[in-house]
């Protein structure tokens, strides 16, 4: 098990994050509780900034806000000098409410609605990443209506699909995102953008996958993209001024996960693009990367209270916590794995192998299969580690569970950045149509 960021275990054997004893946090804020380590978020943002923009100048690191999008998070990312990527009107709204400078916002997505595109045009976001032909025409028409010329990147599918430890090159990648390079659609789309009166072609964008450990995937992708850049210049005369290589940098969840160093990632990407620019006699583009998971993931911990357990001798012992797939659907969605620590007895040696399940009415509601823990009692606190990315942002109200609060911890201070939902919140948008109430009273009356 690996402790992340500011985590430590105090003399009482309690897990401490950001100088806050998690036993106290549970008492004060209740469980389940998402805890975000401010120092780790900021340190990672700074390492990205230093490794790319600080060292190489013409580059930008933008945080993929879908990972964990809240007002406080957008605010911290802004303070650390990163840009922001959004994929919906809701994420854009969140960024704008946090006073994120719109010129540093990139808007992605494979099916942006006309209303979302208009919202982005009116907000004057820095770049809209055009994903498909329908959007290209729609955006050009909407920009014309608003009397604007919109800066765009063209999203392409480079035919590289990265997995944790390798990448797969397929002639024609099977993906819903972007214009395919190998079919000629990417080139055609760029041509169309350069001819569209209200769109300004700024460059290319791609994203090859997530939880990537093998940096060579990025080298290979940069090569495909720069080759495309050379072809674009030859056939259309357009210049790729910006090259956005997406996110995907992998993190440690469990033993065996071996993340690369951010500075190595930066050196490899910047070096490769610069070499290729020289060999194709292309101007060096501004390079953009979009980390999400690697900024928010390790900074997050979910704290649960253990309730019931069920021992099936010779088969398995289930230990249930007061949350589950509603606050973390990732294990059910894609067999994600996590480490955990008994937060109120963190220095005790493991004694048994158990499986951690949630409280949802779903057999698939599992958080961790087979983890070594001390013998647990109901009332103990379980901290599941590395839950900062795609947990809160993917959470649901399944079984009408209110979403947990999120607290931001630093130097012994804990502040709520998202309030715990209440039962009232759950029914806030529910309505009973007058018609239902009427028919019921008629039925009763006629009985
Ligand atoms: C999801 C996504 C990211 C972030 O990916 P991580 O694996 O969280 O770093 C960046 N860019 C695009 C276009 C994405 O879809």
Image (cartoon, rainbow, N blue to C red):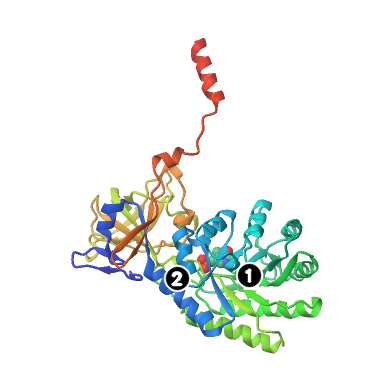
Name which residue lies at 23% across and 52% down: 377
Q: Is residue 158 left or right of residue 65?
A: right
| Residue 61 sits above or below residue 147 on the image | below
Q: Residue 67's x, y, as percent?
A: 49, 62
Name which residue lies at 60% across and 78% down: 287
Q: Nearer the viewer, residue 279 or 130?
A: 130
| Residue 135 sits above or below residue 56 on the image | above
Q: Residue 408's x, y, as percent?
A: 37, 61
| Residue 28 sits above or below residue 336 on the image | above
- Dot 1 and dot 2 residues touching (CB under 8 Å): no
Q: Residue 229's x, y, as percent?
A: 71, 78
Check the image and name the residue furthest to the left: 12
State which mark lies toward you, 1 or 2: 1
Give the residue number, with chain letter if any, for mark 2.
251
Query: Which quadrant of the figure shows ligand 1?
Result: bottom right
Q: Is residue 300 left or right of residue 104?
A: left
| Quadrant placement of the N terminus | bottom left
Q: Quick one: label 1 or label 2, which is nearer the N terminus? A: 1
Name which residue lies at 69% across and 68% down: 151
Name which residue lies at 58% across and 68% down: 104
Total marks shown come to 2
Q: Is mark 1 within 8 Å of ligand 1?
A: no
Q: Is residue 188 left or right of residue 443?
A: right
Give the residue number, with chain letter if any, for mark 1.
206
Q: Is mark 2 within 8 Å of ligand 1?
A: no
Label 1 residue SS: loop
Q: Say the numbered circle drawn on residue 378.
A: none
Label 2 residue SS: loop
Q: Nearer the viewer, residue 110 or 362?
A: 110
């Amino acid at each position: 098990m690996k402790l992340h960021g500011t985590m430590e275990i105090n003399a009482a054997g309690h897990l401490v994050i950001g100088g806050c004893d998690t036993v106290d946090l549970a008492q004060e804020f209740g469980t389940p509780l998402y805890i975000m380590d401010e120092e780790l978020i900021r340190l990672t943002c700074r390492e990205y900034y230093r490794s790319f923009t600080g060292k190489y100048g013409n580059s930008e690191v933008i945080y993929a806000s879908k990972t964990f999008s809240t007002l406080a998070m957008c605010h911290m990312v802004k303070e650390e000098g990163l840009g922001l990527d959004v994929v919906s009107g809701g994420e854009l709204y969140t960024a704008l409410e946090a006073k994120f400078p719109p010129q540093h916002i990139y808007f992605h997505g494979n099916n942006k609605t006309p209303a979302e595109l208009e919202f982005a045009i009116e907000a004057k976001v820095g770049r809209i990443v055009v994903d498909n032909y329908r959007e290209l025409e729609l955006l050009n028409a909407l920009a014309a209506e608003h009397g604007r010329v919109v800066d765009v990147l063209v999203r392409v599918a480079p035919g590289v699909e990265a997995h944790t430890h390798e990448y797969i090159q397929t002639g024609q990648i099977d993906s819903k995102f972007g214009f395919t390079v190998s079919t000629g659609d990417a080139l055609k789309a760029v041509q169309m953008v350069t001819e569209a009166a209200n769109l300004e072609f700024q460059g290319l964008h791609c994203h090859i996958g997530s939880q990537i450990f093998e940096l060579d995937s990025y080298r290979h992708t940069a090569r495909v993209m720069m080759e495309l850049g050379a072809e674009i210049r030859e056939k259309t005369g357009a210049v790729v001024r910006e090259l956005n290589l997406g996110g995907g940098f992998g993190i440690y969840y469990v033993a065996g996960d071996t993340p690369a160093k951010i500075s190595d990632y930066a050196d490899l990407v910047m070096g490769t693009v610069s070499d290729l620019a020289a060999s194709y006699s292309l101007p060096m583009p501004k390079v953009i990367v979009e980390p999400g998971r690697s900024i928010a993931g390790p900074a997050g911990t979910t704290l649960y209270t253990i309730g019931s357990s069920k021992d099936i001798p010779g088969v398995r012992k289930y230990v249930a916590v007061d949350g589950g797939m509603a606050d973390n659907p990732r294990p059910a969605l894609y067999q994600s794995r996590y480490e955990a620590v008994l937060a109120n007895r963190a220095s005790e040696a493991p004694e048994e192998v158990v499986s951690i399940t949630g409280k949802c009415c779903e057999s698939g509601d599992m958080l961790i299969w087979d983890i070594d823990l001390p013998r647990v009692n109901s009332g103990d606190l379980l901290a599941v580690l590395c839950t900062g990315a795609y947990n809160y942002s993917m959470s649901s109200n399944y079984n009408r569970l209110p979403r947990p609060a999120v607290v931001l911890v630093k130097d012994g201070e804990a502040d709520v950045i998202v309030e715990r939902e209440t039962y009232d919140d759950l029914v806030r948008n529910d309505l009973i149509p007058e018609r239902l109430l009427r028919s019921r009273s008629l039925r009763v009356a006629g009985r």
